Image (cartoon, rainbow, N blue to C red):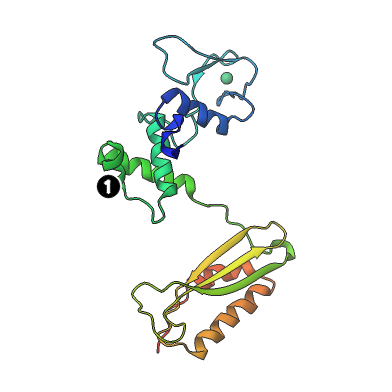
Amino acid sequence: MSILSRAEFHNEEKAYEYVEARIWPHGATCPKCGERERVSKMGGKSTRTGTYKCYKCRKPFTVKVGTIFESSHVPMHIWLQAIYLMCASKKGISSNQLHRTLGVTLKTAWFMSHRIREAMRDDNHFDFGSGGGVVEADETFIGKEPGQSPRRGVGWKMKVMSLVDRRTGRPKALSLTICAKIPSCRYCARMWRVRLLFIATRPATIIPWVASFPPMKL
Ligand SMILES: [Zn+2]
């Protein structure tokens, strides 16, 4: 079966069920008072899909409260389609493309992609090796640097440095935008210096430092 034919991409009820199962793994929870017991789904004809009522604080709520779907009139199954497209497209997807594919206005597509990207953001500024933990570091060359053409050596390839915090198992990959027009010892030396510094005791301070590398003058 095609992924796109899954019910949550077409049926609004199923789409809500899909999201609810993820946000409320232990059953519907009132976002205002946290009540889990005295909560029931409202089933009236005029009731909007996925509306629950909390009998403790007497307020209605949906799974959208406090999520990227809050105060949006876009149907949930369209949201799920947008999320799928954004996550499954290898090179990402533009708001314009979302607008054309999903049949929503450009403004809506822009709003959705903003919120989805916001949800994807990894804002957990985690200090690698914090508390004296061990950080593994390695570097490699992948593909080619934008605007470079293949030639002898590795100067034209994209330089990627990866880190793994051994305690938490969290990885991080950095693309080092060091402009190395020719494969030079200076560049290699720099790589090694970065590596050695990472292995040293204060890796968290090195990440911004690597990111701030100026292009190499040759
Ligand atoms: Zn409540």
Image coordinates for residue 141, horizontal then vertical, percent:
50, 75
- The residue that appears at 43% across and 78% down in the rendered structure is 214
SS for dot 1: helix
Image coordinates for residue 108, horizontal then vertical, percent:
30, 38
Q: Is residue 56 left or right of residue 14?
A: right
Image coordinates for residue 113, horizontal then vertical, percent:
37, 44
Image coordinates for residue 144, horizontal then vertical, percent:
41, 74
Q: Which residue is mark 1?
A: 96
Instruction: Tell me the crowding category of disc 1: few under 14, some 14 to 19, or many 20 or more residues within 10 angstroms, Cα based.
Output: some
Instruction: Establish if 104 lies above or below 209.
Output: above
The quarter of the image that holds ligand 1 is top right
Under mark 1, the amino acid is: Asn
Instruction: Establish if 184 lies above or below 173.
Output: below
Q: Is residue 191 left or right of residue 151?
A: right
Q: Quadrant of residue 149?
A: bottom left
Q: Residue 38 versus residue 153: which sits nearer the camera?
A: 153
